[in-house]
């Protein structure tokens, strides 16, 4: 047992171990999601998180050590976001026709997402630091964390809330949108990208290429609108 413990101490210090475990967890989660016909509750990201957290807790591995190994996946977020321009270009005519209702929907959605977070948080008596961490939760993580820091909140808490928001949106959103959107891929994707940012966009691409394209637009523009609107709403609604 001592030798096994020594081997684990050595392996756990190697960055490649956590990258390998992350990819293995996501590979298994993707396989499971396919076996479940991509049911909303079988979201690969949520399943991967559920698999990795117990491993980190049981081994006493701090998040910083895990991130040192898995940061290559984080690095790929940049190229992946840029690559969203490819399906967007393919569906540019559809996007052009829907420009006006899309702009209105994104503006209303960004205001409601941030404003409701602030008002609900106030109703529960949350202090200003926690409210600042909640307000930009529907934007993608780098933008949301920057907004929270400028408002005097906790960026680390914002990162957790962004992930939780994305997971809830990707899990529950399709169940509602199949009834509301009624076959409209543009509406389906736009709603998921607006409310659940990157995780919702990945889920939209599983629905259709067109839905993923509109989710990618919503992901980017919601981040921009959130950065512009949250400071204004903060000044009006925050205590």
Image (cartoon, rainbow, N blue to C red):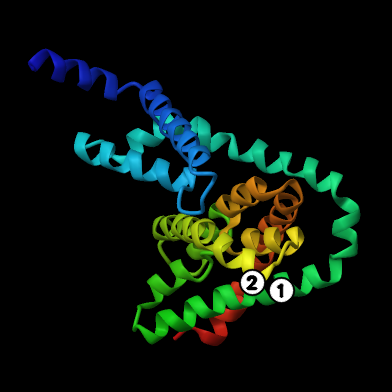
Residue 39 in the image, given as x and y percentages of width and height: 51, 50
Could you tell me how far apart the alpha carbons at marks 1 and 2 are, in whole angstroms?
5 Å
Question: Is residue 158 something that shows in the picture?
Answer: yes
Q: Which residue is mark 2?
A: 110
Q: Residue at x 85, y 65 (%)?
A: 98
- Nearest the viewer among 55 and 132 is 55
Q: Image height check: is 230 above or below 29?
A: below
Judge the density around disc 2: few (<14), some (14-19), many (≥20) Cα neighbours within 10 Å.
many
The quadrant holding residue 229 is bottom right
- Nearest the viewer among 171 and 156 is 171
Please give the label number shown on residue 128.
none
The quadrant holding residue 77 is top right
Dot 1 lies on which element? helix
Residue 18 in the image, given as x and y percentages of width and height: 37, 28
Q: Residue at x 88, y 51 (%)?
A: 92
Q: Are marks 1 and 2 in contact (CB under 8 Å)?
A: yes
Q: Residue at x 47, y 60 (%)?
A: 168
Residue 216 in the image, given as x and y percentages of width and height: 70, 52
The quadrant the N terminus occupies is top left
The quadrant the C terminus occupies is bottom left
Is 161 on the left or on the right of 181, as rendered?
Answer: left
Judge the density around disc 1: few (<14), some (14-19), many (≥20) Cα neighbours within 10 Å.
some
Q: Residue at x 64, y 58 (%)?
A: 193
Given the current orientation, which residue lies at the most extreme left position? 1
Q: Which residue is mark 1?
A: 107
Is 86 on the left or on the right of 108, as rendered?
Answer: right
Q: Image height check: is 184 above or below 43?
A: below
- Nearest the viewer among 27 and 217 is 27
């Amino acid at each position: 047992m001592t030798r096994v413990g020594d081997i684990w101490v050595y392996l756990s210090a190697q960055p490649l171990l956590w990258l390998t475990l992350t990819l293995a967890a996501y590979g298994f989660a993707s396989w499971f999601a396919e076996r479940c016909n991509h049911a909303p509750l079988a979201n690969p990201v949520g399943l991967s998180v559920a698999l990795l957290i117990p491993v980190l807790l049981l081994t006493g591995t701090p998040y910083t050590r895990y991130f040192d190994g898995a940061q290559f996946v984080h690095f790929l977020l940049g190229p992946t976001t840029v690559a969203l321009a490819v399906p967007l270009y393919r569906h540019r005519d559809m996007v052009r026709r829907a420009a006006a209702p899309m702009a209105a929907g994104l503006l209303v959605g960004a205001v409601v997402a941030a404003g409701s977070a602030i008002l609900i948080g106030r109703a529960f008596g949350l202090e200003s630091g926690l409210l600042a961490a909640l307000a930009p939760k529907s934007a993608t993580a780098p933008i949301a964390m920057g907004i929270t820091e400028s408002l005097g909140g906790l960026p680390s808490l914002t990162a957790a809330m962004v992930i939780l928001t994305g997971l809830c949106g990707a899990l529950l959103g399709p169940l509602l949108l199949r009834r509301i959107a009624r076959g409209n891929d543009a509406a389906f994707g736009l709603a998921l990208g607006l409310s659940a940012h990157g995780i919702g966009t990945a889920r939209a691409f599983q629905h259709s290429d067109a839905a993923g394209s509109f989710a990618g637009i919503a992901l980017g523009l919601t981040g921009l609108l959130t950065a512009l609107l949250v400071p204004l709403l903060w000044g009006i609604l925050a205590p």
